[in-house]
Image (cartoon, coloured by chain):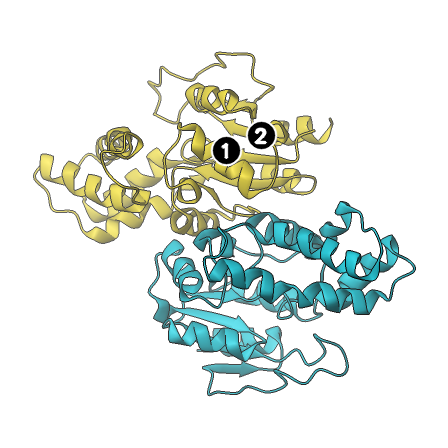
Chain colours: A yellow, B cyan
Amino acid sequence: MVQALIFDVFGTCVDWRSSVAREVAADLPRVDALAFADAWRGEYQPAMERIRAADRGYVPLDVLHLENLHRVADRIGVIAPDSLNAAWEKLDPWPDVVEGLKHLKQSRIIAPCSNGSIALMTRLAKYGRLPWDCILGADIARDYKPKPEVYLAACSALDLPPGQVMMVAAHNDDLMAARDAGLRTGFVARPTEYGPEQQADLQPEADWDIVASDFVALAAEVNGR
Amino acid sequence: MVQALIFDVFGTCVDWRSSVAREVAADLPRVDALAFADAWRGEYQPAMERIRAADRGYVPLDVLHLENLHRVADRIGVIAPDSLNAAWEKLDPWPDVVEGLKHLKQSRIIAPCSNGSIALMTRLAKYGRLPWDCILGADIARDYKPKPEVYLAACSALDLPPGQVMMVAAHNDDLMAARDAGLRTGFVARPTEYGPEQQADLQPEADWDIVASDFVALAAEVNGR
């Protein structure tokens, strides 16, 4: 019996790409805003990888986002204001997310298990009205997904065994890591997360416990069990 | 400008005494339920003190509650079921709390900064419909109030300086520690937390930044600033 569902956020719950591009366009009107958003996000995995590899101590994602903002801006020869970093706190949820989460919250604990910090996830939830019961993820574990510690710290914080917690993501690699840590898995495809040319994660690549078309369908499936 | 309010929970937000007594009465019909609740709560500070003093590594409050349950039951010669420990997840909010928190949530971040764990605070919020934005407190700091680390870890998790965070409590010593750590302070008296004979914390004992009669009045004061 799944007692709690924990969620990837960037891409799975919210459309980071067009939202960040909107904020970039407002602050840096001369740059290609979507290309800037993609480049900014492109620095995400390498920045976390140093921390996963213990080449650097844990710092919250907000710090990495700010460093990456200036790295990308420098590369194309523009000066970005630090305040643009708050773009990551203003990401629009996909249209099904708030309704689906409200349905799930009636019967289960729901929480983000994101690489975003508590500060970032809290502000993002207020912006998008995401009705989380609590905020889990990287800050709790002081490490980054897909390291197993992050999924297990979320289960531990809820005082639940991993088999009673379902990780929900639009990314097959996130679910693979969660399954390896003993969690249940739910896949919801977000085929335009990376824009119209997206190649990866268009389909489930393993027999995840639930595959749903969106969060409303996911809630119906979970609540019907 | 206060950006976030963080709250003591046991006594300040919820009536732990009559709620725990109700659960005790259901499981242990032959004992004096209010006296049992008082004795159980009486073990709370000494159990945390060992961890504050580093005589014992951090364990969540749920573990201390369970140990204390059996200590109190042993003392009066009864056997208590482990499941009675969940009494602490079923504490009724004082009547003004949910409405006041909803008003505050419209303009500020609201979170518990309790000695209760994330697991406990999450279940308690679902039981009492407390609309927290996130869960802070002892589990984040891996230490117990009134150590300054707990208040400062809450501010750090929100990426806010202590001067932009207000601690709200019905206990003068909690507010004193929060003020010493640099936070703003709000006092709401709960004169029957310990029953009709309560002697302590009937009045504010320092010039707290806000003194309010209940959470609805607190919200009006904060939102009016």
Q: Along the line of sight, which residue is nearer the eye, B179 or A190? A: B179
User: In which quadrant of the rendered image does the N terminus of chain A lie?
Assistant: top right
Tell me the kind of residue under disc 2: Pro
Classed neighbour count for the residue bearing mark 2: other residues with Cα under 10 Å, few (<14), some (14–19), many (≥20):
many
Residue A98 seen in this snapshot: no
* Vertical side of A112 occupied by A185: above or below: above
Is A100 left or right of B6, judged from the image as shown? right
Circle on res. A152: 1
Q: Which residue is drawn at 46% across and 78% down?
A: B176
Q: Residue at x 50, y 58 (%)?
A: B51
Q: Along the line of sight, which residue is nearer the eye, B2 or A79? A: B2
Q: Point out residue B33 in the picture as x, y percentages from the top left corner.
A: 84, 65
Circle on res. A162: 2
Name of the residue lying farthest toward the right: B30
Q: Point out residue B182 in the picture as x, y percentages from the top left corner.
A: 36, 73
Q: In which quarter of the image is residue A186?
A: top right
Tell me the kind of residue under disc 1: Leu
Q: Point out residue B223 in the picture as x, y percentages from the top left corner.
A: 49, 73
Q: Do the residues labelled 1 and 2 touch (CB within 8 Å)?
A: yes
Chain ID of residue with mark 2: A
Q: How many marks?
A: 2
